[in-house]
Image: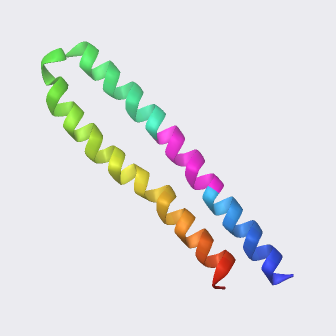
Amino acid sequence: MMEDINLLAAGIMAGLAALGAGIGFGLMGGRFLESVARQPELGPMLQTRMFIIAGLLDAVPIIAVVLGMYLMFAA
């Protein structure tokens, strides 16, 4: 019974993390395009910051998948 709950928790954790990251990437990309359309001269600076934030945002689902795999195989 506990193994089933651990599998369910791992699936929910990875799924919600991926959903949140997808929404975050969509919002970030939209805001980036809006700001570059308003002030094109800030494009290179904003692009650098966008890629840094994208890397940090991408770390959340990776951590969730690792924790989910830990729950599935080690716990």
**What is the total number of numbered labels drawn onto the structure image?**
0
> Which residue is found at the position 27% from the left and 14% from the top?
37
Give the left or right position of residue 20, taking residue 27 as reference: right
Q: Main secondary structure of the magenta part?
A: helix
Q: Is residue 66 above or below residue 18?
A: below
Q: Is residue 18 magenta?
A: yes
Q: Is residue 73 above or below residue 32?
A: below
Q: Nearer the viewer, residue 53 or 38?
A: 53
Q: Is residue 52 above or below residue 27?
A: below
> Which residue is found at the position 25% from the left and 20% from the top?
36
> Which residue is found at the position 27% from the left and 22% from the top?
35
Give the left or right position of residue 72, taking residue 41 as reference: right
Residue 43 % position (x, y): 19, 24
Quadrant where the image shows the C terminus:
bottom right
Which residue is situated farthest in the bottom direction here?
Answer: 75
> Which residue is found at the position 62% from the left and 53% from the top?
16
Residue 54 % position (x, y): 35, 44
Quadrant where the image shows the N terminus:
bottom right
Point out the stretch of residues depicted in magenta: 15-24
Q: Is residue 52 above or below residue 66?
A: above
Residue 33 % position (x, y): 33, 21
